[in-house]
Structures are given as C-alpha cells and as structure tokens.
Amino acid sequence: MTLRTKTLLVIGVTLLGLIALLYITGSTIWLDSFASLEEQITSQNVRRAVNAIFDDLKTLDALAGDYAEWDDTYAFVEDHNPAYEEANFFDDNFIDLHVNLMLIYDSAGQLVFAKNIDLETGTEVPVPAALQPHLQPDSPLLRHTSLTSQVSGLLLLPDIPLLVSSRPILTSQDEGPIRGTFIMGRFLNAAEVERLSGLTDLSLSLQRFDGPALLPPDFQTARETLAGGAATFTQPLTANTIAGYAPLLDIYGQPALILRVDLPRNIYAQGLGSLRFFALSLVAVSLVFGLLTLWLLEKLVLARLARLSRGVSRIGVEGDLSARMVMFGQDELAGLAGDINRMLAIMQYTQQELQEAKQTAEAANQAKSAFLASMSHELRTPLNAIIGYSEMLQEEVEELDQPELIPDLKKINEAGHHLLSVLNGVLDLSKIEAGKMELHLETFDVATMLNEVVSIAQPLAQKKGNTLVVNQPDNLGHMRADLTKVRQSLLNLLSNAAKFTENGMITLTVEKQETKNRGAGGQEGRGAVISPAPPLLRPPAQITFKVIDTGIGLKPEQMERLFQPFTQAEASTTRNYGGTGLGLVISRHYCRMMGGDITVASNGIPGAGSTFTIHLPVEYNGQ
C-alpha cells in the first residue's frame, strides 16, 4: 500500500469517524430537544382540551345559576305552577341551551321536576336510573349548606359520563332561605366530544378510567402513569402521531375519564428534517475539507516525497552514485534529500575505495596464486625427496639390523607426509577461493565407494580402541558426483571421529531418500545445529552420510567457528589431537560445489559426542 493510499485511507476513516460521532451526538441532542419540545406542546394542548371541558362546565354552571337564583323558580318549588313549567321547560329551550337534563328538588330532597331531552332527536327520554344513587339526600348534589354553595363537575354513569351542575334555589337577590336544589346536566357523548374537538381544533377521545382490561394499549400505559398522580402524559403512537393524556376527576375527586389528544408530529418531523440537512451539510463540509487536505498534502508532501522516492529508485536501478537529489525548501523532506546526497557522496567515495581495494586484493590474489604455484613446485620436490629417502633409509636400517633408528625415521616420514598434506590443503583451499577448483563428475557405485572408505577408516578407528559400525541399505545404487571429493569428504569425517574418540563407537549411517523443500542442512541428531548455506534447490532425491561418534563433543560457541579455515574447537584441541582445521572447510566446499552441504549437531555436553552429516544429490548435473 502506497503512502498516498494510506494518507487517503487515514483521512477518509478520520472524516467518517468524525461525521459519525458528530451525527450521533447531534442527533441525540437535537432529537431529544425536539422530542422534549414536542412533549411540551402536546401537554399544552392537553391542558387546553381539559380547559375547554371545564369552560363547557362553567357555561353549564352559569345556566344552572341563572335558573336557581330566580324568584319564579323560588316560587315554583312551593306552588308547582304549571305556567312556569310550560314557559321554561319546553323541548326547544333544552335544545337552544344545549342541555340534556334539568332537575328540581325541594329542601326536603323530594323531586319537584325532572326532564331529560335527547338533543340529537329533540325528544324527551327517561331520566337515567343510574343517576338516582347520586341524588340521595346526603349526596353532594343535594347538600347545600350555604347560599354560595355550588357543585359542578363530572358524574360517571354506567353508560355515559355526565357534565353536571348543582345550585341552591334562591331568590333573584341571592337571598334565602334555601328552598331546594336546581340540577342541570349535559351528557358527554360522542357528539359532545366531537363538538369540543371542533371548538379546540383538536382530535379528542375519551375512555373510562376504570374501564375494562381490554383498553387500547396506549390508554393502559397512560392509566398506569396517571394513576401515580401525573397531571399529563405523552407518548408517540406512530412515526407521525403523538398523543397526550390527562385524567378527568368526578364530583367526588376520583379519576373518572382519560382524555386523549392526538396531534401530528410536525415538530419532530421538522427536527428530523433539520437533522438530515445537518448531516448532508456535515458530509459536504467534510468532503470539501478532506479534498482540500488531500490537495495540500499532495502538493506540499506526497508529490515531493514521491519525486524523492523515484530519484532514489532510479539511482538504485542505474547504480549512478554521482546523481544527486534536488529538493527545494527548508522542511524535513529537504533535509532528507540533503542527507541522501551526503550518503551518496560517502557511498561514492567508499565505492571508489572499495574498487581500489578490490584491485589491490586481486593483484595480491594473483601474486598469491603465483606464489603458491611456485611454492607448490619448490616445496613438493624436496618434500617428496625427504619422504622417499626416509622410506629408503628405513629399508636399509632394517637390512643393517639397526632397529633403534627406525622410530626416528618414521617420525621424519610422518612429518613429511603431514607437511605435504597441509601444503595440498592450502593449495586446494586457494583454488576453491579463487574459483578454479573443478569437478570431475562420474557415475559410481555408492556401496563400492563406502567399502573403500571404511577399509581406510577402520584402522584409524581401531588405533584408539573404537568400534566402527556401518549402517547402509542394500539398494543404494549409483550416484553421479566427483568420486574423489566425495570419498575425501567422507574420509575426513571418519578420520576426525576416530581422532576425537577413544574407546568409543563411531557409526556411519547412509540413507537414500526423497528430499523436501528445505534449506541446505537443518537440524540433525540432537542439540544445537550449525546453520548451513542459503536454501538450495535440491533434485528429487538425495543421499546422506551421517557420522555419529561418542567423542569429546562440541559446545555451541565451538560449533560457530568450526568451519573457519585454520580453526579448531579450542587451542587445546590442536595441542592434544593435532590438525590444521582445513579438512572440514575443504570438505564442506566440496559438498556445496556438488549441490549439497555438511551440517553438524551436538547437545553441547562435553563427552557426549557429535553428529556430522553430508547431504548430496544422487544426480548432480553440474548446475
């Protein structure tokens, strides 16, 4: 992912997160505010509807007062004058006054007059029998103890609620004594509710507070809240409608009805519209801000950084260390370009020094090769003479029967052979490092080669009381490699095992197997492992020669320098066992030249032995 893409992603995610955070916060605060305002407006309209009912009740009370505080009514209670009844209680008068019910009781609580009109049909109907329990002598409607006494309110009958007003009957001068009670009522039926809805321009509905359990769910919820003493209650009915509720008390002070006012959710809808506009504005502003930020970053940072990156890449591809970065300004990118230019100058100077050092080293290497070639001839000739004459002297001493001289002559012969071996090793290592060592590939029988190597290594193992055990399958077959170098490498491992093991066991295990995709070498045997060369592309099959001994073993720090020229595990190893440390180095080079490697493993415990393994391809084609 490019830096430009990452920058775009970071800015985009940041803006999206900011928009989401602001939208969530804004919507919570915004919509809560509009919802609160909506509830306030709904509660106000509920109170307005309640006031409309109370105003209707006040009008009814005023009419009742007009009739109760009148000399004609005062006299009618005593004389029951039919003319008064005909002049005031005819049907059309009920309709004009919008009154359903008029009752007159004397001071003893006896009914003097009663009439009930159905305002929809204009006909007289019986006074509801359910009204009788509320018209007992001790009822609030008939109990007036003072001239100013009045009772008005809601009376809940089984079939229909009734707005009722009760006044004491007095003279026109509001004087007593009280001769009785005048009661006027208006049924709060559907028509009356519809009339009140028209007056208030509100959608009104009523339900009994003590109604059945099958009340609409919203009324049940409202009743539970209002029963706790709340004056009003609001709740949304749908996404477009909200309802407000209020209790209506009867003349006994108990909740009788639940009034519901339905209102459209215009305020909340306005809040939603404003919120959507806010969200769109926020997205637009964020988009403009994001594009502006990207443009500024592109112009001031990303484009310059991309130009700097292309310049560095071009230098890397072309290898032209004389090129320099051009970057104007005084910021970090200009400073970075300056640092790159200084680094390029140092690298250019270092490359020149390296080139000169390389030329010097190549000249020295050529001189070394010439010297070694010359010394090879100069040293091998006298060494061969020393070795040959020492062998001839041994034969003459034996013929002259002078055995006391033989040990010294053997030492001379062995020293000559050792020096010749060292010289050959140095020359071979020099050829390998110079890349002049050649392979002579041939196909040979593995079992035959093993027999030859074991026959040479067996006396070396027995010399220190060791037992050499060979484990090999019967189907080893043939392999294609440099026979001499394979034999020399394997013999080196066996001779080392014999050298560093006393009265122990040396095991040679040979396996032929399909290889897996792994690096050259890997963990072998036990303990830590020397990590070999980089991964090699091996052929389908390989053969391994594993040499396990019970000798002195190796520590991890010793294994790290095991394959370095002229180096052994410790200085004491050279003193106690001899050797130059070239054998393993040369053997490993041979194996790698043939597409294989040598690995070593040891658990790091002195005296626990080591495991050396040669990995070689069965068929090496020279690539």
Image (cartoon, helix red, strand yellow):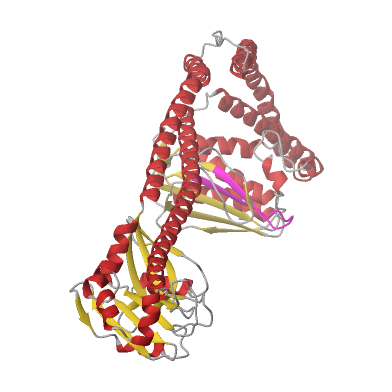
Residue 212 location (% of width, % of height): 35, 82
- Residue 62 occupies which quadrant of the picture? bottom left
Residue depicted at 49% across the width and 49% down the height: 33
Residue 353 location (% of width, % of height): 65, 11
Residue depicted at 66% across the width and 31% down the height: 420
Q: Which residues are magenta?
A: 598-615
Question: Is residue 608 in view from this perspective?
Answer: yes
Horizontal side of 541 relative to 485 (left or right) equals left
**Residue 250 within the segment the image draws in magenta:** no
In this rendering, is residue 184 above or below 523?
Answer: below
Count of marks, rendered view:
0
In this rendering, is residue 302 above or below 448?
Answer: above
In this rendering, is residue 222 above or below 532?
Answer: below
Residue 66 location (% of width, % of height): 39, 70
In this rendering, is residue 473 above or below 95?
Answer: above
The front one of 199 and 459 is 199
Tell me the quarter of the image containing the C terminus. top left
The front one of 101 and 357 is 101
Residue 32 location (% of width, % of height): 48, 52
Question: Is residue 595 in view from this perspective?
Answer: no
Instruction: Farthest residue to the right: give it.
Output: 404
The front one of 272 and 412 is 272
**Residue 614 within the segment the image draws in magenta:** yes
Tell me the quarter of the image containing the N terminus. top left
- Residue 8 occupies which quadrant of the picture? top left
- Residue 113 occupies which quadrant of the picture? bottom left
Horizontal side of 521 relative to 132 (left or right) equals right
The front one of 486 and 248 is 248
